[in-house]
Image (cartoon, rainbow, N blue to C red):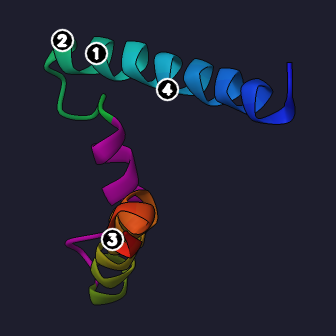
Amino acid sequence: MDTEDKWRLVWAGWVAAFIVAETIALRTKHPHAPLSHHTRKALRAGETRAGSIVLAGASAWFIHHIYRKVADG
């Protein structure tokens, strides 16, 4: 097993754990359960301009990071 395969397993496990946790959080229908709530709370997004800017910037970076190879052709 090469390094890429090992990291693929690590990231697949992380994604699987996230999906399980977020599914449980969303099914509870409690507004304080999902990751989005905790992210907004930690950044104080919606409460402060800086928090909203950081959240928007992080979201833009993440989208660019994920689609970078597609955009580069």
Place residue 68 in its image quadrant.
Answer: bottom left
Q: Which residue is mark 3?
A: 71
Regarding mark 4 in the picture, which secondary structure is present there? helix
Q: Earlier in the sequence, mark 3 or mark 2?
A: 2
Regarding mark 2 in the picture, which secondary structure is present there? helix
Residue 71: x %, y % from top left: 33, 71
Regarding mark 3 in the picture, which secondary structure is present there? helix
**Residues tagged 3 and 1 counted as in contact (Cβ below 8 A):** no
Region in magenta:
35-48
Residue at the left extreme, as displayed? 29
Mark carried by residue 15: 4
Q: Earlier in the sequence, mark 3 or mark 1?
A: 1
Q: Which residue is mark 1?
A: 23
| Disc 2 residue type (three-letter) | Arg
Residue 16: x %, y % from top left: 48, 17
| Disc 4 residue type (three-letter) | Val
Mark carried by residue 27: 2
Residue depicted at x 39% and y 78%: 54
| Disc 1 residue type (three-letter) | Thr
Mark toward the viewer: 3 or 1:
3
Residue 42: x %, y % from top left: 44, 59
Regarding mark 1 in the picture, which secondary structure is present there? helix
Q: Earlier in the sequence, mark 3 or mark 4?
A: 4
Mark toward the viewer: 3 or 2:
3
| Disc 3 residue type (three-letter) | Ala
